[in-house]
Image: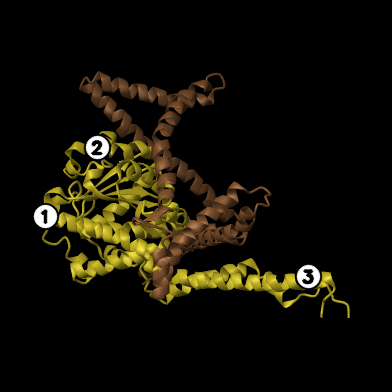
Chain colours: A yellow, B brown
Amino acid sequence: MAEDKNEKKWYDYLLTIKKPLVYLGMFLVVIIPFLSRCKLKTYETDLVKKVFTRVEKIHEYNKEHPDSKRGILLGFDYGPSTTPENDPMLYAVLRHAFLRDIPVVAWAPYVAYLQLAEGRIKRIAKEYKAEYGKDYVFMGLAYPPTPYMISTGTDMRPMFNTDYYGNDVYKLPILDRFNNYDAFGLVVTISGTAMPEVWLRYANSLYNQDVAVATTAVNAAKFYAYAASGQFTGMIAGLKGAAEYEQMVTRLENKVIDEDIKEYLTGLYKNVDKDKYPEKYYEPEYTKSEINTAILRRRQAGRGMSSQFGAHVYVIILIIIGNVGYYFKRRDEKRRKTGKWGA
Amino acid sequence: MGTILWSTFAVFLTLSIFSFLIKDNPFYKFAEHLFAGISVGYLVVITFTQIFIPRVWKPLMNSIDTGNILRSAFLIIGVFIGLLYLSRASNKYSWLSRYPISIVVGFGSGFAIAPSLNARVLKQLHSTVVEDGQSLLNIQKIIAFFRDPSFSSLYNATYGPLLVIGVLVVLIYFFFSFKNDNPVIKYTRTPALLYMMVGFGAAFGYTFMARISLFVDRMNFILNRWWPLIQNKLM
């Protein structure tokens, strides 16, 4: 019997699944873990552990040398388009630094990142009663970044004149010491761009400064070569890396604070001198919804990982289905051409 | 009330953008144009308040007040050279923009060449030969694997040679991409392709993770931030 060329085979159905159906499937696999409040513990990789260990080493050093402490220079190198991945990284790194009382100096290299950075940094500083100008400072815009990175080899202050809030950089006590690479135990670049390469080129290559990178998954493949060669001290890559770091910091936080986080935040600004915390930087009190948000923030990446898992399994299945369909379709076409059909 | 309104508007914009998955439509177009317009407006204002005012205007006024002529002149010359960029708008005077461009290119190249060579070539080359003071082609690690076979000793024994072989075959592939029947070039093509496929696969996997993260975040916003607000308001 002659083969009907228009007859649809089983693999044709596999290869012509409608796009809206594929999207609907993706929507479901992402949303179900959210609705079911599914929790997934993630394993911790060496590259992320290296960043964590490096920060811990700074803490150890600071304990032994209280008069010549080392800090962290934080490059806020991301914009709104990559906040889902970079935000949990930033929160985890800042929580770790403030938890260990490590001074933080931060800047942002592009105007679009400024307000984003300011809001996020003060949000975390507030959770640990960090004082602006003493425990942390946001320098504001460092554009174009190259001269700022180079000037930090000697003193970053002349490049800035003022910080983000307009304070004179020579009047901020934190900057008396933390104004060049010698005072920083680590540069952490939280990035959704190619900025880590620029840090590597100037801070690491010129000044031998340790640089750790926290980057989006898209950029991770590019930066692996530098992490493997040891040029980057460690790497937090994508939501998975963020979930790992978040997990490590939460474990540390439970150990250091040793108190239910809700109670800790509720009592944080009771019986403290509120004049130490000008409202320009953050309001020294917590509302109920702020506490809930702060608690949710502690598992921001971890919560996303359950959906990631579902989405990855779903795509693996789709790739297998597509390949199986394509394989059998090609096999049949080949047989049809060589006349071996039905043999 | 303001929070609910703005959050609901954010949800509306998110859904408008996602509606493009079905097909192009006015909601998508509205969200897209709104984003483009707001981005430009925001950047102009922030550039003025965060660059011009604190980096130019205030220091200039300050140095004029204190009679620091040298600093004032330095700032004015800098602003003048920067303004030459705007000459591109005129056909007659666009050549003036070459001055600021040449300064930026000169400075950038001068500073970038040596550190780039160091960071991207020399250190990478070094790490393809030596790791932690030991050669990557370390026969001792291979012997250690045969003495005590385990996953960890297998990884230690194969990691270095695989990396070195990978770098060599891929370099050969790109260096001799023309037809060449030399056996070295001929027989390294398939392994080079395999290495590259693994690299592309890893890049694709990571890209997929990144895109899903964006979607997860929007769902997180809708389900964990916006919806509880609405629930609280309704109850």
Q: Is residue A294 above or below residue A25?
A: above
Which mark is nearer the camera, 3 or 1? 3
Mark 2 lies on a secondary structure that is: loop
Residue B219 appears left or right of B90: left
Query: What residue type is disc 2 on?
Result: Asp
Q: Where is residue A169? Give x, y as percent.
A: 22, 38
| Residue B78 in which image quadrant | top left
Q: Quadrant of the N terminus of chain A?
A: bottom right
Q: Establish whether labels 2 and 3 are both on one chain.
A: yes
Q: Same chain for marks 3 and 1?
A: yes
Q: In this rendering, which labeled residue sits more in front, label 2 or label 3?
A: 3
The residue type indicated by label 3 comes to Lys
Kindly report which numbered mark, 2 or 1, lies closer to the viewer in this rendering.
2
Q: Nearer the viewer, residue A225 or A101?
A: A225
Q: Is residue A155 above or below residue B29?
A: above
Give the residue number, with chain letter if any, for mark 1. Answer: A273
| Up/down of A327 relative to B104, above or below | below
Q: Residue at x 48, y 26 (%)?
A: B86
Choose the circle earlier in sequence order: 3 or 1.
1
Label 1 crowd (10 A; few <14 / some 14-19 / many >=20): few
Q: Secondary structure at mark 3?
A: helix
Which circle marks residue A334 in the picture? Answer: 3
Residue type indicated by callout 1: Asp
Which residue was labeled with disc 2?
A155
| Residue A175 falls in image quadrant | top left
Q: Mark 3, chain letter? A: A
What residue is drawn where x is 16% and y is 54%? Answer: A62
Which residue occupies the foreground of this view, B9 or A113? A113
Lower sequence index among marks 2 and 1:
2
Q: Nearest the camera: A315 or A161? A: A315
Q: Residue at x 63, y 73 (%)?
A: A321
Q: CA distance from mark 3 to mark 1?
A: 81 Å
